[in-house]
Amino acid sequence: MSNLFITFIKMTTEAIKKDESVSRVFWRFAIPSVAAMLINGLYQIIDGIFVGHYVGYAGLAGINMAWPIIATIMGFGILAGMGAGSLISMARGAGDTPQAQRVLNTTIGLLLLFSALSIPIVLFYGYELLQLQGASGDSLKHGFDYINIFSYAAPFAIMAAAMPILVRNDDSPKVATVLTILGAVLNIGLDYLYLGILGQGLQGAAIATAISQSIVVALGLFYFFTPMAKIRITKLSIEIKSAMEICKLGSSSLMMFAYFSFVIALHNLLLMKYGSEIHVGAFAIIGYIATLYYLFAEGIASGMQPPVSYDYGNQRPERVKQTVALASKVILISGVATVILLNLFPEFFISLFAAQDEALMSATVEGLRLHLSMLFLDGFLFLASVYFMAVGKGGKALFVSMGNMLVQFPFLYLAPQWLGVTGVWLAVPLSNLALTLVVAPMLWKDLKGLLIPELEMTPAAQTT
């Protein structure tokens, strides 16, 4: 097994070459990144399909109330992975391999620390966090079934979120994709076993996900102990300076996950207040459908990060601008196309997650058309955050992520009071539009500044 894995690494490990075209480098990283994100997202989507058909809307509501807790915990893995990924690529672009090595060692130490802290937090506060979202009755029971298992498996979720990112930034994007494919395929089989055959409900779904993620973690760690890795794990340590830089750059990614978690939790609470458990189940289905685009956009943005960081570290601003422009076109065009498809064929997509339930179908169609009307702006905002992080401007990246969260408050507070459930559905698209009007000029100004010779500088010279 190990020899086969090492052979595969030899075949797929790739480096960024100075004479490659921008589009070639971008797609070489973006395609495996998108595949990895979509496949990794299958963990949640597959859970949703099986839960929707084998448990029903109460199960969907329960898992949707568990998701804000899970996503926040996973966000710490993304923080470590994205922050370290940017530093590793910039160090390698500048020819400083020893620094890249130190960053990797520190990242593993941080992941272990986050993992150790996650278990007691979820174990002791999971039930109360579900109740804060308005969970009660069947939705509370199902949500706690999932959280109870997840509390012990949280370290796997954290590590599995970071591993593909770290492997990809070691110039092995295809290896990262294979790791997530293995985990997703296992998750499909285990979901069918635990839900379809054994009938273990949300506890079974949580067990299936935990086993799948543990395999991704094991293989990801194994990769960095092989001689095929360009940088290797040599010791478990946390270098304070590197750890602070990782957390600074990765904080925007954590805040993005915290933002999604907060928005989901607040929607759950408001939908229970102005609607019913059926509306929370509808919101869960809408979330699963939207996840396909979110993960695609995240994959494009994450695939953009290594070449942008590398070219920025190598002082090639023209290539940075071209890469960001290409990624922006892909994200916006695909987002608009997705919105059109969802409005033309909503019942088809909804039926993947719901059994024959007319009330659930009606609520979901209405919510889908309203809530996802500005879906493409979500992708753009994520791209802007990743760009600022990729060039070492953690302050601006954090501004985008924090702004995305803070702008939600007035819309989510006022719109439901005026429009009821309809206001809940419209709050996010309206707030995304407002934030984009601020972030788009900020991104344009930053990219334009990169092209002025006197502003060209190393990443260390400009970090905010």
Image (cartoon, rainbow, N blue to C red):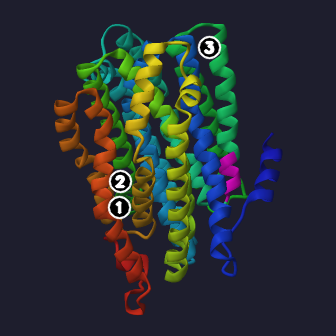
Q: Residue at x 70, y 53 (%)?
A: 174
Horizontal and vertical percent position of residue 441: 32, 70
Sequence order check, earlier mark of 2 and 3:
3
Q: What residue does disc 3 label?
A: 194
Q: Which residue is mark 1?
A: 397
Q: Of discs 2 and 1, which sits in the foreground?
A: 1
State if disc 3 and disc 2 touch (CB < 8 Å): no
Q: Which mark is residue 408?
A: none
As rendered, which of 39 and 464 lies closer to the eye? 39
- Range of magenta residues: 172-177
Quarter that holds the N terminus: top right
Q: Earlier in the sequence, mark 1 or mark 3?
A: 3
306 in relation to 42, above or below: below
Disc 2 marks a residue whose amino acid type is Ser
Taking the magenta stretch, the answer to whether it contains residue 173 is yes
Label 1 neighbourhood size at 10 Å, few (<14), some (14-19), many (20+)? many
Name the residue at 55% across, 71% down.
323
Tag 2 residue:
251
Sequence-first disc among 2 and 1: 2
Relative placement, left or right, of 100 versus 458 is right
The quadrant holding residue 382 is bottom left
Identity of the amino acid at label 1?
A: Ala
Label 2, residues with CA under 10 Å away: few <14, some 14-19, many ≥20: many
